[in-house]
Structure formats: structure tokens, C-alpha cells
Amino acid sequence: MGFFEKMYKEGPQRTRSEKLYDDALLIMNSIEKQNERLPEDIRGDVLAGEACDTIPGASGDFGHDIHNPIPVNGPIGEFSYLSRLRMKSTGGRVFFHKLRTIGSIDEFELTNVSGQFADHLFLDPWHRAQSGWYPHNYYLEREAVQPRGITTTCPDFPRDLYKLIKKEAKRWLSVDVAEKEAQHIRVEEAQASLQQFRSKENPDL
């Protein structure tokens, strides 16, 4: 049973708040509902994109190589897909923000609550559905429950991430909810890990 289901069980006296949380859970896990919420200026291009697990002709490490990005359905698809990822080694949650956009591909940075983990992933948001594949060092949860990151840039990532997740959730889900563990990320450790990772992977940053 997911977070929203635990908090708001079906019953005869359902409140408006309960319905909002139920609707949020549905949106997080319904491609159709997500696509309905895409901004009008990009919806047509996203819906015209191919539904695929991997980009035809892609090469390199899935998700980790810009030439083999993860296909998803717009920024709300990035929000949902990345919120389902867990570390294969520990089962731990990961938290994310968008570092930059390179052409049509978005690059995200990720860390974990201890701050000892740092990674980046490339996503292609111009597809009408999300990939069912996942990078080799992760696995995908069956459903997205609570949001764990943002599709914009957190200037001092991961500081203040919890507040920013709630703000973005309000935009996509109409309710300001976030994974509570995001409040306890060890910011200094995460920033040190990310800086070390960047110096290896993105020396120009």
C-alpha cells in the first residue's frame, strides 16, 4: 500500500483533501493523466514522440551516456520516473534536480540521504510515454509514491530541496507533497560527493 493510500483510505466520508492526495497518486502513475497536465506549448511535441524503452540507434551506457538517454513524457515524466528510482546496491531512495539541458536532452544530478552517493542521468523528455528500462545501478519501484526531486535547477543542491519538491508537486499534482526523507539529506556531504563526481564527469562545470 502506497503513502497516499495509507493516509487516505477509501470511505464514505472522504474529504476534499483526501481526494486531492488520491488524485496525486493517480497522476504520478498514469501516463495519460501526466500528458494531460503538460503545458500546451510542449504537449503536441511530446505526444508526437515515439513511445520506446530506448532511443533507436542509441549507444553507450543507458541513462549515463548522453547518446543513450532515458525516454520520458515531458518534464512531468522526468518528475515521475526519477521518483521511482532506487539504488540497486542498497535499495535507498535518490533525490534529484536538473543540472542543465544540452540540446534536447536534460541532465540530472542525483544524491542520497547520506550524501555519500553522487550520479548523473540523461533523459530525453520528448516522448509520449516513459521507458520501462532503468540504468544498471538502479531499479524502478512499481509505482511512484512521493516526489523526490525537481525538474528545474536547485541553485545550492540539495539544500532546500524538500521545499522545492513541494512547490513543484503543487504545480504537477495540485498538492504540496514531498518525500520526507528529503528533509534529512546531509547537504555538506552530498555537495562534496557531487563536486568530486563533477570534476571527473563534467570538468567544464
Image (cartoon, helix red, strand yellow):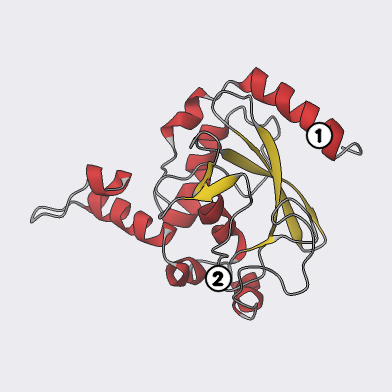
Residue 129, labelled with which disc?
2
Residue visible at 37% across and 55% down in the picture = 24
**Would you identify the image quadrant in which residue 3 lies?**
top left
- The picture places residue 148, in percent across and down from the top left corner, at 51, 41
What SS does tag 1 mark? helix
Image: 19 above or below 166: below
Residue nearer the viewer, 135 or 77: 135
Residue 15 image offset from top left, x and y in percent: 18, 51
Q: Is residue 199 above or below residue 149?
A: above
Name the N-terminal-most of marks 2 and 1. Answer: 2
Residue 198: mark: 1
Amino acid under label 1? Arg
Q: Nearer the viewer, residue 70 or 181?
A: 70
The answer to whether residue 138 is above or below residue 191 is: below
Q: Is residue 85 above or below residue 54?
A: above
Q: Label 2 vs label 1: CA separation? A: 30 Å
Of 153 and 124, the residue lying toward us = 124
